Image: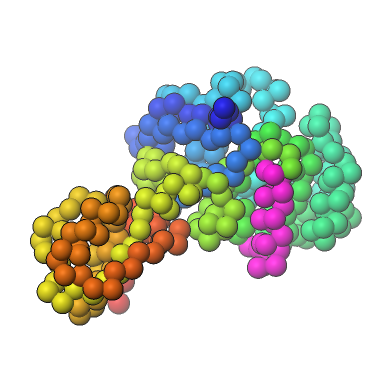
Amino acid sequence: MTVNVIETEDLIKYFGDKPVVNKVNLKIPEGTIYGIVGPNGAGKSTLLKLIIGYYWPTSGVVRVKGKVCSRDDASFRQTIQLVSAEWGFFNSFRIRELIRYYGLLYDRFDQTRCSRLLNALELSNKSRVRSLSLGMKTQLRLALSLASRPSVLLLDEPTNGLDPVVKRQFLQLIVQEAAVDGTTILIATHHLDDLDRIADGVAVMHKGQLIASETMESLKTKFKEIQLVLPSGIPDSIRKLPDIISIQQKGNYYTITVNSSLEPILGLLQEAGALHLEVTDLPFDELFLKLMAQEGYSRESLLL
């Protein structure tokens, strides 16, 4: 039986007269790595802050481990962590002082694990926070959060500022956390290739709304690309099919993106005289662009 660790019901958050999160219904299964993607201003960071209780909903409900978040519930803070570049440290502290501080805050804080993580990330506990680069601060946040042994880990653009080697190590730590400790991890990011490698599921947001939320496997299964040669051109009857997302043409060569069962469309294309039919999966970044295009979002044209 699937247990949903994070659930939101008709979650709405207004800033002024604008809904930044608008009727979001989201379910995140226990022990999974789940991504939140969307263009700038889609509401990803706000959603994470609503889940952790930093923001309070205008309406709707957030449940973590079946419990509605309360501002006065100290036990809730013991089970959930947010790693975000927005949240600063005490810049005058040394790392070892931060470790002692976290040890006082969190009942399950594991000093041994923290030391091991800092060594792996090549962070000296003698360093002052102000001397760290953006990427090093992100690594420090992750080490302290993981050492607190949360049940839920929220990550907001966690790989910004990391070089490729450290980024790979960072992602490996996240995967290990979900696999070994059963931590439920929710990542808001623009780095779609990161999610393609590690995520079990993905939620796609646009203008505060959730336009898709499912496993990565099922999302990729729905969207396919058909490549073919059709000397006579594609009939209007096929072009107008509702499950065709886009058609690209170069001479008699066509690339068709579909969101449906393939067999009916393939049959119609063969009847129209299609040659060299080939069906391929879409990479997640291409799939994301197709979803955004369906919502009328495109930034491909440039003003020169």
What residue lies at 14% left-to-right and 55% top-to-bottom? 240
Whole-percent x, y for residue 290 in the image: 34, 57
* Pick the front one: 155 or 228: 228
Which quarter of the figure is the N terminus placed in?
top right
* Pick the front one: 294 or 60: 294
Which of the 4 image quadrants contains residue 194? bottom right
Whether 124 is drawn above or below 106: the answer is below
Asked if residue 50 lies left or right of residue 92, the reply is left
Whole-percent x, y for residue 252 in the image: 20, 78
Q: How is the image coloured?
A: rainbow
Task: Give the extent of the magenta segment.
Answer: 161-179
Asked if residue 258 lies left or right of residue 198, the reply is left
Residue 76 forms part of the magenta stretch: no
Q: How many marks?
A: 0
Residue 294 in sight here: no
What residue lies at 48% left-to-right and 29% top-to-bottom? 8
Whether 282 is drawn above or below 45: the answer is below
Identify the main secondary structure in magenta: helix
Which of the 4 image quadrants contains residue 97? top right
What residue lies at 55% left-to-right and 46% top-to-bottom? 200
Whole-percent x, y for residue 304 in the image: 30, 77
Which of the 4 image quadrants contains residue 76? top right
